[in-house]
Amino acid sequence: MLLLSKEDIRQVFTMRDAIEANKRAFQLLVEGKCNAPLRTNIQAPKQDGCFLFMPAYVEEMDTASLKIVNVFPHNIDQGLPALPAQVMLIDGKTGVVKSLMDGISVTQIRTGAASGAAFDILAKKECKIGALIGTGGQGAAQLEAMLEARQLEEVRVCGLHYDRTEAFVKQMQKEMERYDARILPVKSSDEAVEDADLIITATPAEKPVFDGTRVKKGATISCIGSYQHHMQEMPPVILTRASKIYFDSEEAVLSEAGDILIPLEDGTITKDNFTGDLGNVIKGEVTGRENDEEIIVFKSVGVATQDLVAAREIYDKAVKAGIGTKWNS
Ligand SMILES: NC(=O)c1ccc[n+]([C@@H]2O[C@H](COP(=O)([O-])OP(=O)(O)OC[C@H]3O[C@@H](n4cnc5c(N)ncnc54)[C@H](O)[C@@H]3O)[C@@H](O)[C@H]2O)c1
């Protein structure tokens, strides 16, 4: 078995690799080629947490995977990640586990790449300004994906605490230097979204995190945060202003995301407002952006197919490059 750390993954798998891997994953999903049962959730009330198991199998790739991502919010007090995670990659011909890799990195890069794939496919060609709301665990990969998808001049970043936003931005200015964009901390989401062409929300918020009336025509918005019924980071008005609404998986989004479920239930939108899954656009079955005036929304909750395709590519590249630690049981 090959053990792959965060550093190993970073060495072999770029954000561009991840964006292309996500496009393949979204296509496999709409083609019904990935057997990925809804994730198993075992509650751990003593710790206010839960264990989440996300399995997937793609026969045509002879690959299966299992991501274990556990939510333990009090870990922060011990300096441990609140969402510890690992991905197991399994040989579909033999059932042998071939690799165990850092699941936090896989999740961050594939979740960033979902926004990246959506922007690649749905955003206007000419985009200058980006807005990132949320500077937590997912923030860096979301920012990188946005910069990778379009040549932006400026990205404005905002979070709940301005001092943390400033520290995040300082670090990102170094890490993302190669993209040659101004990355700026701002104090409010109003300042962030004003005139923005690309907007990402990556928060666990339970109330909308920006004013949807301030979003300009032609903007593309990717909301990755809300994954439970009571979570809502997207203002419903943006859904009524949007000409098109896409998902990573409509089925998965409708099984959990308050961002869509709440406005559906109160009648702000109906299912007729939904355009389709990103995989349908990739396959040419559903129309994408038709002009530079349309506001487009992409909502994702994450699907195990993304982990499987990313993990398989990371493994193949690591083997080729001779990277990782071999372990024999
Ligand atoms: N779609 C997916 O595939 C996917 C994958 C992983 C995580 N997630 C979800 O994405 C969300 C973010 O994850 P994370 O690990 O970065 O979380 P985190 O807790 O590490 O960070 C959350 C960030 O949101 C900011 N925030 C919260 N409320 C805000 C508000 N009202 N206005 C502005 N900023 C606000 C916080 O300041 C912080 O920077 C979570 O809900 C997580 O479950 C989704």
Image (cartoon, rainbow, N blue to C red):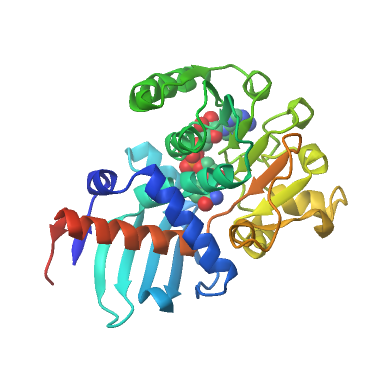
Quadrant showing the N terminus? bottom left
Rendered residue at 75%/38% (across/down): 294
Residue at position x 11%, y 69% in the image: 328
* Quarter that holds the C terminus: bottom left
Is residue 11 shown above or below 274? above
Q: x%, y% of residue 7?
A: 24, 43
Q: Is residue 43 visible?
A: no
Q: Place residue 89 in its image quadrant.
A: bottom left
Which of the pair 94/328 is nearer the observer?
Answer: 94
Q: Is residue 295 left or right of residue 123?
A: right
Q: Is residue 33 above or below residue 153?
A: below
Apparent side of residue 88 relative to residue 224 in the rendered image (left or right): left
Q: Residue 153 in the image: state x and y as whole percent.
A: 52, 21
Q: Is residue 70 above or below residue 181?
A: below
Residue at point 72%, 35% (across, down)? 292
Task: Residue 201: give x, y in percent of width and height.
Answer: 59, 37
| Residue in front for this viewpoint, 285 or 63 | 285
Q: Please, which residue is most extreme toward the bottom here? A: 94
Q: Quadrant of residue 133?
A: top right
State the image coordinates of residue 206 (x, y, percent, origin top left).
Answer: 67, 41
Numbered disc total: 0
Q: Is residue 112 visible?
A: yes
In screen coordinates, is 131 left or right of 326? right
The front one of 73 and 323 is 323
